[in-house]
Image (cartoon, rainbow, N blue to C red):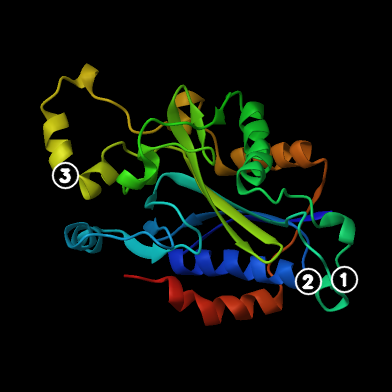
């Protein structure tokens, strides 16, 4: 049985530290694979671990009303407003457990994710796809003609790690690997305004778009609540849990963080806060 941590809101730095704490705990063998759902309060923009900003964009980000944090994973900037974030931690098949790393967790729950990063994305995203299907929405893995490295906004380009609907990106995900441990987390857009990140990242482009006729303006991303009837976070959470159960043939037990994970969060969270 795997672990489920139910939806709760935290500030951005705490959210990032919690995800890392879960990864480290799993690597030690202290906790099973873990699925977690959360929100950001206050709303925030998270930057990829290695994402570089020019001076102008850095200034605009710092002048925005959003908190600014750095993720432990890669990728581009993500606005955490009108979204639902998930994280999933497990182990790759490359894991070779020794007695001092095996802990008390059944070995059969480990080593189920592919060594290939792209294949592991597909495995984890299968849980999201199944969950969205239970909400009545068909999605598939992304593909884009936009060069991901040429944009700062994560939702301007879809990769094989992301989910899209009718060509528009709905879920953006990023991954981190340490030893045999795998952390994947991502943002599922619920009802985020199209122009917020565009205004911050490329205000000149927004001015040009503003002069276009309304019917000619392009959407940058998909919103779940524009594709299906609006519903409570708890209902979306239940569908996604069921999706992961189906995709991995498992069940979940709802628990909280361990005391060791909580201690890790208190020590580590300051490292993620940029503003």
Q: Nearer the viewer, residue 264 or 193?
A: 264
What is the secondary structure assignment of the residue under circle 1? loop
Q: Identify which residue is drawn at 75% across, 73% down.
A: 28
Q: Can residue 177 be seen?
A: yes
Q: Identify which residue is drawn at 34% across, 63% down.
A: 67
Q: Identify which residue is drawn at 64% across, 27% down.
A: 133
Q: Quadrant of residue 53?
A: bottom left
Q: Identify which residue is drawn at 71% across, 73% down.
A: 258
Q: Which of 134 and 60 is in front in this view?
A: 60
Q: Can residue 230 be seen?
A: no
Q: Earlier in the sequence, mark 3 or mark 2?
A: 2
Q: In this view, does 156 lie above or below 16?
A: above
Whether residue 140 sits left or right of residue 215 in the image: it is right
User: CB under 8 Å between callouts 3 and 2?
Assistant: no
Q: In which quarter of the image is residue 24?
A: bottom right
What is the secondary structure assignment of the residue under circle 3? helix
Mark seen at residue 203? 3
User: Mark 1: few, some, or many residues within 10 Å (few <14, many ≥20)?
Assistant: few
Q: Position of residue 101 (x, y in %)?
A: 80, 74
What is the secondary structure assignment of the residue under circle 2? loop
* Residue bearing the label numbered 2: 30
Q: Which of marks 1 and 2 is nearer the N terminus?
A: 2
User: CB under 8 Å between callouts 1 and 2?
Assistant: yes
* Mark pair 3, 2: CA separation: 47 Å
- Label count reads 3
* Mark pair 1, 2: CA separation: 6 Å
* Residue bearing the label numbered 1: 104
Whether residue 66 sits left or right of residue 171 in the image: it is left
Q: In which quarter of the image is residue 42?
A: bottom left
């Amino acid at each position: 049985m795997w672990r489920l941590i139910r939806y709760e809101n935290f500030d951005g730095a705490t959210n990032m530290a919690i995800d890392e704490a879960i990864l480290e705990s799993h690597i030690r063998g202290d906790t099973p694979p873990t699925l977690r759902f959360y929100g950001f309060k206050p709303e925030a923009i998270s930057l990829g671990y290695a994402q570089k900003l020019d001076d102008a964009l850095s200034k605009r980000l710092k002048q925005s009303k959003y908190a600014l944090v750095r993720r432990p994973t890669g990728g581009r900037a993500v606005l955490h407003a009108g979204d639902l974030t998930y994280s999933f931690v497990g182990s790759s098949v490359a894991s070779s457990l020794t007695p001092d790393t095996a802990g008390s967790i059944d070995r059969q729950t480990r080593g189920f994710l592919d060594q290939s990063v792209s294949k592991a994305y597909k495995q984890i995203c299968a849980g999201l796809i199944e969950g969205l299907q239970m909400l009545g929405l068909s999605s598939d893995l992304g593909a884009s003609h936009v060069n991901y490295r040429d944009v700062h906004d994560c939702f301007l380009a879809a990769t094989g790690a992301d989910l899209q609907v009718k060509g528009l990106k709905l879920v953006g995900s990023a991954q981190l690997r340490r030893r045999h441990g795998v952390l994947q987390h991502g943002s599922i857009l619920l009802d985020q305004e199209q122009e917020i990140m565009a205004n911050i990242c490329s205000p000149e482009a927004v001015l040009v778009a503003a002069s276009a006729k309304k019917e000619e303006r392009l959407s940058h991303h998909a919103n779940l609540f524009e594709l299906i009837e609006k519903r409570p976070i708890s209902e979306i959470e239940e569908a996604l849990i069921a999706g992961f159960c189906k995709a991995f043939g498992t069940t979940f037990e709802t628990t909280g963080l361990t005391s060791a994970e909580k201690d890790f969060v208190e020590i580590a969270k300051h490292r993620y806060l940029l503003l």
